Image: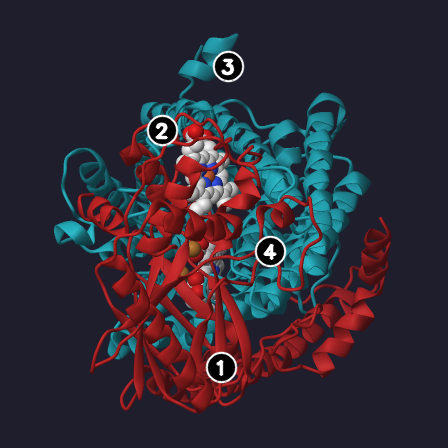
Amino acid sequence: MAHGPAKGLSRWLLTTNHKDIGTLYLWFSFTMFLLGGFFAMIIRAELFQPGLQLVEPEFFNQMTTMHGLVMVFGAIMPSFVGLANWMIPMMIGAPDMALPRMNNWSFWILPPTFLMLASTLFMEGGAPNFGWTFYAPLSTTYAPSTVTYFIFGVHLMGLSSIMGSINIIATVVNMRAPGMTYMKMPMFVWTWLITAFLLVAVMPVLAGLVTMMLMDVHFGTSFFSAAGGGDPVLFQHIFWFFGHPEVYIIILPGFGVVSQIIPTFSRKPLFGYDSMVYATASIAFLSFIVWAHHMYTVGMPIAGELFFMYATMLIAVPTGVKVFNWITTMWRGSLTFETPMLFAIGFVFLFTIGGFTGVMLALAPADFQYHDSYFVVAHFHYVMVAGAVFSMTAAVYYWLPKWTGKMYNESMGKAQFWVSFVGFNLTFFPQHFVGLAGMPRRIPDYALQFTDFNMMSSIGAFIYGASQLFFLFNVIRTIIAGEPVNRDKVWEGAEGLEWTVSSPPPYHTFTTPPPVK
Amino acid sequence: MHSQAKRLLKLALSPVLLLLSFLSTGVWAEEAPRWQVNMSPGVTEVGAKIYDLHMTVIWICVVIGVVVFAIMFYSILAHRKSPDREPAQFHESTTVEIAWTVIPFIILVVMAFPATTTLIDIYNTDDAEMDILITGYQWKWKYEYINPEGENVKFFSNLRTGKTEIYNEDDKGEHYLLEVDEPMVIPVNTKVRFLVTANDVIHSWWVPALAVKKDAIPGFINEAWTEVNQLGVYRGQCAELCGRDHGFMPIVVNVVEREEYDNWLAEKAADAVKIKELMAQEFTLDELAARGKDVYMRSCVACHGVNGEGGVGKAIAGSAVATGDIATHLEITINGVPGTAMQAFGGQLNDVDLAAVVTYQRNAFGNNMGDKVQPIDVYQFKQGQ
Ligand code: HEC
Ligand code: HEM
Ligand SMILES: [Cu+2]
Ligand SMILES: [Cu+2]
């Protein structure tokens, strides 16, 4: 038992091994990614042409809501937790996570939670239909009865995230190998440490918010109902106090991944390591004082409006620092372009475009025209899909040979990159245009002048969706029939403790701490 | 099929068209350009300022983007692995780190100036010559012209596009989904203040050409303003997800000469007075049925059929409701049937028309109930809710 995994199903159900739990998280999140993607395909198919063809508006709203929830809470966040589980102990020279039993628990909460959420689609009244931002009173007084399941689900997801982050903090703080000082930790570990603090800080706020909703829905309070003396705008303040840090929770581990991959394939150390750490920390700090940039149109006093505008613009500075550092890392390196590097460069290119639109959105007067239009949809897909999802894909290709001891098919990986790159841009670039031309978001049908760009966007979405099937195929093929890599250091330029153990690594790594130079 | 082919052709030509439309950003007026890729400066001073701000930032981003990406792509091309070159190993330079922190900061400060002045302008609702109270409902807008000296003029503005167009049974009209039964009318070159609120959930009143977007929040009254300097019809939509028909509550603002506006307002006020007088009146069955037939042919026939035979809606001829309890009949007509195409007509038709159409349904198509509903009955029914 001590040296290998248990047999059969109980290996996965009862496991406390960080690698097994990492694997579970990764497969779970990929499943959710396909489910959320399926919802997105329904949305894009309905929007292929003006008029209602496939679904009714009521169901369309359920699709936009479930798509957002599943992608954010089911796909992106758990995928990075899975990555953290696999990589953090191996990167800091620890034998496992600090709290292995809790680790098991924080994973196994998730599948039943999402099963429950998905089952609301088949319930009387339908699934939640108030958007992933679930503004009250649409999500309270006017909500379908399944809102109660939604609230319970959010509580469970929050619990899982909080346990996961406590575990990561405990691991990073206590379990580093001797000599692994904070300022020697790989960037991925740094970004996750900061992310974990963000999670611990804001998930309870989200829990408080949905509890207030629960009280409004079932126990007659009026936190968010003006008729009872409550305040619908209060809802938005609380939501975005969680929500803006949440978007950084989503992207910071991606920053970490890219900061590992670019040096490897540039065969050159990361430029400005210290400033990367400080930039990440200042982004995290600033993310707590910019929330109301999502609320410029609710009628805040002008002083508030100006404060949030200036603070939001400030965030662009550390974000820019990161981009400059990545590019300078490549400068005069010795570059090769394997699939992980392609996705990392794709990330830098497209995320920067999302950053530019972020700065535009930060300007309150201009945001009066952008807000709740497709321009915002384009912005956040550039940072979340080309940001978080591209970096996650890069991470899987980068570490898959380490995890499995087998090499993926390089040409198929490259093909996947180019197909997703084209599909992604075809989907989301035109959304900037329709947004600027006046198309609101979250509508099932649109005026005729938006027809052509929407058609393009839908075609792009189908292409992007199909490219994910390549990915699935490539990963499964690698596991079953990949070429063995037979070396510890899979990539020529790779640095770090994870490359000092065999590929695949033994079930338990670093039971005695490795030397750190 | 033919139009489909044309659309695909356009799709193929899109890069060229895109460039062309970038070069000629037309004003958002009557005819919205199909390949519009950019914000329109609109027809107000504020809109023009926002547009300038937007363009300034875009160009700043384009310049930074070109420089940064040029360096990146140069590196991708020039610094590939090759046997005759070792990678450099530098990884630090305080000077460049400081430079690329300070320079972006300065650029942001430069952007902040026009942003701040424009915002102050948008927030200045003083000296408005008139006020309009805008209330968002699921899923329509109510406009109430505040009249300090007398009765307010108020009416609902509903989507006019028919179900048959939405469900692709008929061809879609030019202003598909952006047309209403009664537009808001405002005079040109006049500062108009909007007081924006909502009746149920949060909506958001957005007309791009006016550069006005303000959330309509139940229990709160937000302020916004506009001063349009060009005659025309400007269209927008609700911008905040508000439930099932969020995509189906457009906004149309008709900007006319002062004189035309005054006439329109006077006519509206007179109409209201007339309805008021009628409200107090008792009608005979024939009078009600005659008026009701007009209303039916305007508002109900699309779903219930010329002979009450039904269609999208249930048959009225022989219907248990139309031949049953009056209160139920009123209830359905006034509040609609949630979850079906049967809308709530209580806010859309005045009490006289409601009384008339219900009476008509009860006595036409062989229903012959012989009973009638007076406007006052409708009024009392609404009060009792
Ligand atoms: C957009 C389509 C539509 C329009 C327009 C419409 N109705 Fe209906 N109506 C329906 C539908 C659908 C139902 C059936 C609702 C249900 O399933 O109970 C219905 C049902 C009714 C019923 C109840 C019939 C029964 O036997 O249950 C009455 C009464 C009625 N409508 C009155 C009116 C009046 C009066 C108007 C015009 C002012 C009108 N309707 C306009 C769609 C429409
Ligand atoms: C330069 C950095 C960034 C700035 C200045 C910025 C600014 C903004 C602003 C002002 C909005 C509100 C727009 C509106 O609703 O009108 C917004 C929306 C959004 N941003 Fe960013 N952003 C940045 C980076 C990011 C990143 C890194 C992410 C996540 C990975 C992100 C995710 C989102 C999301 C999800 C929304 C939309 C939320 C919703 O309404 O559903 N942004 N951003
Ligand atoms: Cu934000
Ligand atoms: Cu709406």
Q: Chain A is which colour?
A: cyan
Q: Amino acid at mark 3?
A: Gly
| Circle nearer the viewer, 1 or 2 | 1
Neighbour class for label 3 at 10 Å: few (<14), some, many (≥20)?
A: few
Gap between marks 4 and 3, in whole Å? 58 Å
Residue at disc 4, CB closer than 8 Å to ligand 4: no
Three-letter code for the amino acid on which mark 1 is drawn: Val
- Mark nearer the viewer, 2 or 4: 4
Q: What is the number of the mark on residue B289?
A: none
Toward which corner of the image does residue B28 lie, by quadrant?
bottom right
**Callout 1 touching callout 4 (CB < 8 Å):** no
Seen at 64% across and 28% down, the residue is A404
Image point (70%, 34%), residue name: A469
Judging by the rendered image, the residue that carries numbered circle 4 is A446
Tell us which disc is closer to us: 1 or 4: 1
Could you say which disc has been placed on residue B255 in the image?
1
**Marked residue nearer the N-terminal end (2 or 4):** 2
User: Disc 4 on helix, strand or loop?
Assistant: loop
> Is residue B95 something that shows in the picture?
no
| Residue hosting label 2 | A106
Q: CA distance from mark 1 to mark 4?
A: 24 Å
Viewer-side label of 4, 3: 4
> How packed is label 4: few (under 14 Cα within 10 Å), some, or many (20 or more)?
many
Crowd rating for badge 1 (residues with CA inside 10 Å; few <14, some 14–19, many 20+): many
